[in-house]
Image: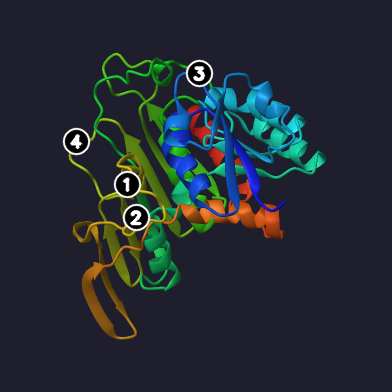
């Protein structure tokens, strides 16, 4: 295939802002169709056709890749239909509510010789890429403690009722936890042991909106937490090692840039303000340093580039499906208490 012809199922936050701009700006993709009932994708992306019947995507031989951008509870059944229709598949996180469902989809994709991708875009956040660079350069020595916080202050219940309704793959573990659990797995692999709890803090909430997780990697201890009731931001990342520490506030700006109308190929896209640069305090090779570290640009486009390289050039997926199964397993374990 000269170009990968793409269709989106859903046109909310993920489809509209986090995916469509990348598919329309990348030379290897051609975004052709969007399945939605309540948005007007043609007004934003004139080359795209809006369809209101899923069959118009599933039965279209000109569609190579389908991306599911709908609520998590719908992913499994939609993914079954897409794979059985003979399409390659990209699924927004959370991939599935359960490990059993995840393995079912993975096995089905393999049996049909179709590629299956999961949209773990925050592996390419600016702050996470910077953290990874610091670890890989050994500036902290042997890492002893890794903390990741994904907090918001949203005491009022979400106006999108489906987000506040108990359902498979709903709640903060699947929403925000899927990101920082995945980041930990990307850095350190499968943990030796898991402890955690999720709970409710907001008045009137019917879903869990906070969690604390500890992943045991032997000498290294990983602490992950999230809450919708944190008004004064905590550091996004805190790292301590035998030779130094790194503390980083702020969060990747790509989502804000996309919502503001910036596109991935525009100057300054994904570049964070200098005020949020992390502090590195270390002593290596007899040299002491304490100061700011420039944050690397966010690179969500790399996830799309990898998908193109897999489908067109036979490279390996950057997000291993084994990592996704590990992630869902951790979420299930913490959910069960």
Question: Which of the 4 image quadrants contains residue 296?
Answer: bottom left
Label 3 vs label 1: CA separation? 26 Å
Label 4 vs label 3: CA separation? 36 Å
How crowded pointer 4 is (Cα within 10 Å; few <14, some 14-19, many 20+) is rated as: few
Left/right placement of residue 334 relative to residue 233 reads: right
How crowded pointer 3 is (Cα within 10 Å; few <14, some 14-19, many 20+) is rated as: few
Along the line of sight, which residue is nearer the eye, 78 or 131?
A: 78
Residue that badge 2 annotates? 269
Upstream in sequence: badge 3 or badge 1: 3
Q: Residue at x 43, y 17 (%)?
A: 162
Along the line of sight, which residue is nearer the eye, 93 or 169?
A: 93
Vertical relation: 157 (above or below) 304: above
Left/right placement of residue 277 relative to residue 144 reads: left
Upstream in sequence: badge 1 or badge 2: 1
Q: Which mark is residue 37?
A: 3
Q: Which mark is residue 152?
A: none
Along the line of sight, which residue is nearer the eye, 59 or 286?
A: 59
């Amino acid at each position: 295939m000269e170009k990968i012809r793409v269709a989106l199922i859903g046109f909310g936050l993920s489809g509209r802002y986090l995916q469509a701009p990348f598919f329309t700006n990348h030379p290897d993709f051609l975004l052709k169709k969007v399945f939605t009932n309540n948005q007007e994708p043609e007004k934003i992306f004139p080359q795209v056709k809006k369809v209101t019947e899923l069959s118009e995507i599933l039965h279209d031989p000109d569609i190579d890749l389908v991306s599911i951008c709908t609520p998590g509870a719908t992913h499994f059944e939609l993914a079954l239909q897409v794979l059985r229709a003979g399409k390659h598949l990209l699924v927004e996180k959370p991939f599935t509510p359960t490990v059993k469902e995840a393995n079912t989809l993975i096995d089905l994709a393999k049996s049909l010789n179709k590629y299956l991708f999961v949209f773990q875009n925050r592996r390419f956040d600016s702050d996470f890429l910077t953290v990874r660079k610091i670890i890989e350069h050994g500036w902290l020595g042997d890492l002893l403690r890794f903390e990741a916080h994904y907090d918001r202050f949203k005491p009022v219940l979400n106006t999108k009722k489906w987000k506040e309704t108990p359902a498979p793959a709903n709640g903060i573990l699947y929403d925000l936890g899927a990101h920082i659990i995945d980041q930990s797995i990307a850095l350190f692999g499968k943990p030796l042991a898991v402890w955690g709890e999720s709970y409710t803090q907001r008045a009137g909430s019917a879903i869990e909106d906070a969690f604390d997780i500890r992943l045991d990697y032997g000498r290294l201890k990983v602490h992950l937490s999230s809450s919708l009731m944190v008004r004064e931001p905590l550091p996004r990342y805190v790292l301590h090692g035998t030779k130094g520490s790194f503390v980083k506030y702020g969060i990747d700006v790509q989502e804000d840039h996309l919502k503001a109308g910036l596109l991935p190929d525009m100057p300054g896209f994904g570049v964070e303000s200098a005020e949020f640069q992390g502090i590195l305090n270390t002593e290596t090779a007899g040299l002491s340093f304490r100061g700011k570290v420039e944050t690397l640009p966010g690179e969500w486009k790399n996830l799309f580039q990898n998908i193109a390289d897999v489908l067109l050039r036979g490279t390996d997926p950057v997000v291993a499906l084994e990592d996704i199964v590990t992630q869902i397993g951790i979420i299930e374990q913490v959910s069960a208490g």
